[in-house]
Amino acid sequence: MKAVSPSALDARILDIFASRQGEGICVGDPHTFIRFGGCNVVCNYCDTPESIPAGSGTVKDLDRVFETISKLDPGHKTEEPDGS
Ligand code: SF4
């Protein structure tokens, strides 16, 4: 089987979900959250430590990310939780 190289637009995605913003000036507003895998920030207050290992998450291309977002509740802003 031939190995498939990841494209520059692929990313390790841990989760994509719609919820309400819980902090900042947009608190309470509907948002779409994209949680990436392989976080290299390693905050000591991390509430999602499963996102830290380099191999965490599933490799998805941009089309799959947009496809997933398009199936979520419309009207949500898109957010990258905690800057990860
Ligand atoms: S940036 Fe987010 S995911 Fe990364 S270590 Fe900090 S809190 Fe955890």
Image (cartoon, helix red, strand yellow):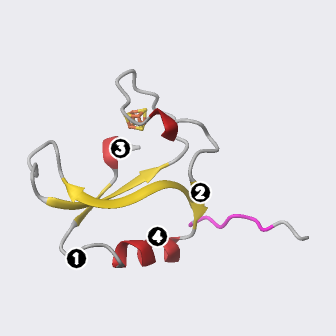
Badge 2 is on which residue? 58
Ligand 1: which quarter? top left
- Residue type marked 2: Thr
Residue mark closest to the camera, 2 vs 3:
2
Residue 54 placed where, x, y %?
62, 40
Residue 25 placed where, x, y %?
8, 47
Residue found at x 51% / y 35%: 40
Residue 72 placed where, x, y %?
31, 73
Residue found at x 56% / y 70%: 61
Residue mark closest to the camera, 3 vs 4:
4
Residue found at x 61% / y 64%: 8
- Residue type marked 4: Val
Question: Tag 3's secondary structure?
Answer: helix
- Residue type marked 1: Pro
Q: Distance between the residues labelled 3 and 4?
A: 17 Å
Dot label at residue 65: 4
Labels 1 & 2 near each other (Cβ < 8 A): no
Residue 55 placed where, x, y %?
64, 44
Badge 1 is on which residue? 74
**Magenta stretch, residue numbers:** 4-9
> Is the shortest distance between ligand 1 and the CB of mark 3 under 8 Å?
yes
Q: Is the magenta stretch mostly helix, strand or loop?
A: loop
Between disc 1 and disc 4, whose residue precedes? Answer: 4
Res 56 → quadrant? top right
